[in-house]
Amino acid sequence: MLKRLVGALKWLLAPEVASTARPAHLWPRWIFLRALGVIYFSAFYSLLFQIKGLIGPSGILPAHDYLQAVAGVLHAQRFWFAPTLLWFGSSDRALMLLCWAGAIAALLLFLNIWPRAMLLICFVSFLSFIGTAQDFASYQSDGMLLEAGFLCLFFAPDGFRPGLGRASPPSRASLYLLRWEWFCIYFGSGVAKIGSGDPTWRNFTAMDDYYQNCPLPTWIGWYVGHLPHWFHASAVFYTLAIELVLCWMIFLPRRFRIALFFIVFPFESSIILTANYAFLNYIVFSLGFLLLDDRFIEWAVPRRIRKLIEKEPPADSSAEAQSAKAEAPPDATPAAPENWRALSRKYLLPVRMTIAAAGLGLIFYCTAVKLVGRFLPSWDFPEAPLRWTEPFRIADSYGLFAVMTHQRYEIEFQGSSDNGKTWLPYAFRYKPQDPREAPGIYAPYQPRFEWNLWFASLGAWPSYRFVVWTEERLLKNNADVLELFRANPFASAPPTQVRAVIYQYWFTDMKTRREQGLWWRRDLLGEYAPALEREPDGKVMFLDSPTFEPPQSLP
């Protein structure tokens, strides 16, 4: 029994061997790693313009203050609870260095230069931000990226310029676990929709006002939102069919997996075009390429294009050559002595396989337990592995849009220099504000501050105190926080009062859009959070209590 188990582990962890019946996955891996490089780059690029305002020393939620609080409570365990390089320093320079290191490594990953090393730099850099970002890192997309990035450390080819990576095919286990992540995202989201009890998924009305009320819509979503109910009901059916039924085709033979790719391709494309979910759907979209194989891609992509990409490895280092050497007869001419690199790989192979078995096995256990636990909540699974992985976000549980929101609220910051007689708004860069401005398309760029304001608008301000702390920074004309906005209406001198008000927004109809140029209509509902006033001595005082009561809690 033990011998069979060891044999099965070796088969899972060994490089994939192509055959007539089972094509390899070198081309899907090449495509996915290039896409992952783009996604990582988009994440770090967006942070270059935001990280100081979010968690810088004078930002909304300073990383230094957070790490100090963690160290005061957890002492020796603080490094595990908050795994981040920012323990060595969290100054503005350190934050920018972290972003630039990640962005450069992501660019080199896209260029296929030393992919494993670049993946490690990207993973550590992004984890270092997530470990200290607090409210600005509570999104499922962050867990998806960290999990995929961690698995790709075992999936990527070895070498400095590996080309297509024929010399180091992916292991079966790493390929299967990336597909498993794809499956968990879809099936977990479908189970969450049904299990939430939201009646709109059961009566096929969940999508009727989705395009209006999603976090950051696009102008395409504005037009799609005006389509008739039968279209939106069909979209609900399409969504539930993919997430609950069709996603199981990933476990069927290759023809079914290829068909599944062409089923989900338009699904993810439509989401990307109608809403800005940062890099979330780009990750799921890219993971879908792992449903394909070399035979299909070599049939679909012209040979001249493939030749521009593929770099043949030396003849004696390819997987086929290694296999031929193993099968050579005993009296064959002895091969040349192995160089030091080959010898090191040979003797370190057991160590590498042990690390891969531990890392990949841990991910599979944690994700499987979280998925199965939704159906069997009373089962008592060992929880230690879940606690080990939780701070690293490499084995998350996914459940997108379990409950749909049916109102759109938008928080707006306003300042005054004349004791509240005149209030001037701070203009946002991306979120809806000016009714005449069309919703934009900017994903995979992620404006984390504005994204968080959408979540805050669905609840009461005490649960989202970063809103009040933003008010306090605006009273001081904090340069880093002001960078999160498009414009500062008080460039010459800071305001004496700042408040956060909340509006309800609706799409306008086609006639209003055509005649008045309005994309939105809105009504002021009141103050969302307490207004703040700066006294002559510099002290900040609360002015009054908010007048807005959220009608629903966060889904």
Image (cartoon, grey):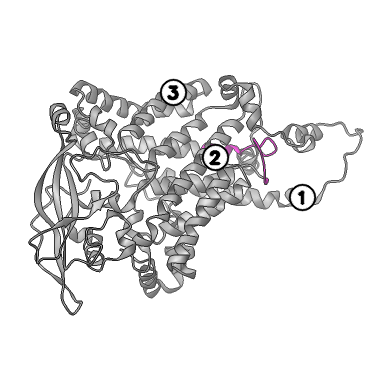
Query: In the displayed structure, would residue 2 be above or below residue 475?
Result: above
Residue kind at label 3, given as amino acid type: Phe
Q: Which residue is mark 2?
A: 33
- Asked if the magenta segment contains residue 298, the reply would be no
Residue span colored magenta: 159-176
Q: State the SS at label 1.
A: helix
Q: Is residue 302 above or below residue 9?
A: above
Q: Is residue 125 left or right of residue 52?
A: right
Q: Is residue 262 visible?
A: yes
Q: Secondary structure at mark 3?
A: helix
Give the label on residue 180, or none: none
Q: Earlier in the sequence, mark 1 or mark 3?
A: 3
Whether the magenta-drawn stretch holds residue 164 is answered as yes
Identify residue for label 1: 341
SS category of the residue bearing label 2: helix
Name the foreground residue: 69 vs 529.
529
Q: Earlier in the sequence, mark 2 or mark 3?
A: 2
Residue 479 drawn at (x, y percent): 32, 64
In the image, residue 197 sits, relative to residue 133, either above or below, namely above
**Crowding at mark 2 (Cα within 10 Å: few <14, some 14-19, many 20+):** many
Q: Is residue 23 visible?
A: no
Disc sitting over residue 262 in the figure: 3
